Amino acid sequence: MKDKKKVLQRVIEETRKEIAGNAANGRIAGALSGEGYAGGYYDAINDVILFLNGNIPNRRGYWDFLKDEGPVTTSDGKIENFVQMVGGKSFRCECGANVFHKPDKADLMLYKCNSCGNEYRGG
Ligand SMILES: [Zn+2]
């Protein structure tokens, strides 16, 4: 079992079994089972899986610092490239290149040339 995401999914299944087992012990145990250690562990592993899939988990703001940092990336973590169309033609940087990335997740209108690093505001 080398695929780390599959390993994490298996850990999730194990926590689910514990939560279901606790729930089988009566109404109060059932109500608390999702709130206890297994429930927290389940949520944490779920967030790690979300993160590994390229998302930023929302839980309690623990991951919010990521929203303000770094470039826009694809789901596999690579910097995403953009070609801007202006008047039916691809926009070109002063240097002649036409492929850009968004260097700041918190500022999606900012584009940076992949070739020379010039920055532009786009729509
Ligand atoms: Zn350029």
Image (spheres, grey):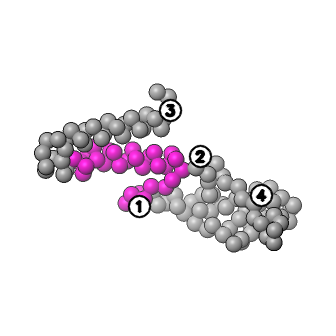
Q: Say which residue appears at 62% left-offset and 58% top-offset.
A: 72
Which stretch appears magenta? Answer: 33-62
Picture quadrant of residue 116: bottom right
Residue identifier under label 1: 61
- Image-based side of 14 in relation to 5, left or right: left
Q: Amino acid at mark 1?
A: Gly
Image coordinates for residue 16, horizontal then vertical, percent: 30, 41
Q: Amino acid at mark 4?
A: Val
Q: Say which residue appears at 81% left-offset and 60% top-offset.
A: 98
Q: Is residue 38 above or below residue 10?
A: below
Residue identifier under label 2: 76
Q: Is mark 4 within 8 Å of ligand 1?
A: no
- 10 Å crowding of disc 1: few (<14), some (14-19), many (20+): few
Precedes in sequence: disc 4 or disc 3 = 3
Precedes in sequence: disc 3 or disc 1 = 3
Q: Say which residue appears at 52% left-offset and 47% top-offset.
A: 53
Image coordinates for residue 121, horizontal then vertical, percent: 71, 71
- 10 Å crowding of disc 4: few (<14), some (14-19), many (20+): some
